[in-house]
Amino acid sequence: MEGIELGGIVSAIKFLFESIRKHVDMSAEQKRHWFNEHIEPSYNQLSAIHDDYTKSFSKALTAIEKRQDLTDAVLILKADRPNCLLKRREVRENLFALRDYLFIQRPESAVIKIFYAYVACVDEYLNAASPLPRETWFTYFIDTFSNLVEQGEDPLAHNYPACAQGDKAPLFAMEQLSRAIQHNMPEAFGKVQQAYANLRAHCLTTI
């Protein structure tokens, strides 16, 4: 999955803004084309990414719990998958621009409102798919964890003195991963699926 980007969502937002600037209402055929060209590919990408996240995080969690294949677990955690795979900043910047437009203009266009709800759910999912904190402790934790693995020592028995969690840091990381895999990610992706279905129904049943 490395290198995948949700460029389809960015392109879809930019297409909407271009239509807004030209004061053009999307025809039924344009909505269908817009959905097929931008929305469906972005959703398919996100579905693949969701599967990748779930399998990878589950693999890392199992490895840590069993104290097996810890090198693989380190590689997964170091990859910082959600941030590396997606152009999250560009997605969010465009999402916020669309939100501001909706707030100021209050457009009548249903497709804009439904699309905004879809992208907002995608953004919520990206947050749910970042189970480990971005604070500085994580960098220290994973570096120390990695070094201990390389030295053949047990990283789950280490004290992690620079972490506020101390020797509970590995447990905290495992709890975060488990919560993301079992609850946060599935719930957030379920919202994406519902928003996608609403957008699909609107764009493909108007002809």
Image: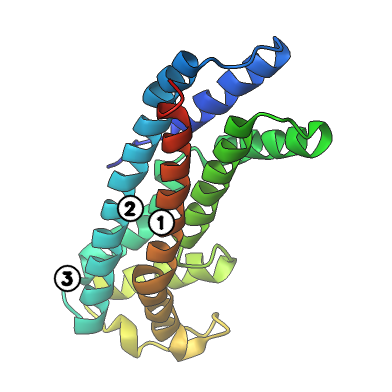
* Helix, strand or loop under label 2: helix
Real-space Cα distance between discs 1 and 2?
8 Å
> Closer to us: mark 2 or mark 3?
2
Query: Which residue lies under the disc numbered 1?
Result: 189
- Image quarter of the C terminus: top left
Where residue 90 appears, as percent x and y from the top left, is: 58, 34
Real-space Cα distance between discs 1 and 3?
29 Å
Under mark 2, the amino acid is His
- The front one of 23 and 150 is 23
Asked if residue 107 lies left or right of residue 129, the reply is: right
Q: Residue at the far right: name it.
A: 104
Whether residue 134 is situated above or below residue 3 in the rendered picture: below
Q: Which label sits on residue 25?
A: none
* Helix, strand or loop under label 3: loop
Tell me which numbered mark, 2 or 3, is placed earlier along the sequence: 2
- The front one of 28 and 51 is 28
Q: Which label sits on residue 69?
A: 3
* Residue at 45% over, 89% down: 168
Tell me which numbered mark, 1 or 2, is placed earlier along the sequence: 2
State which quadrant residue 86 falls in: top left
Query: Which residue lies under the disc numbered 2?
Result: 50
Under mark 3, the amino acid is Asp
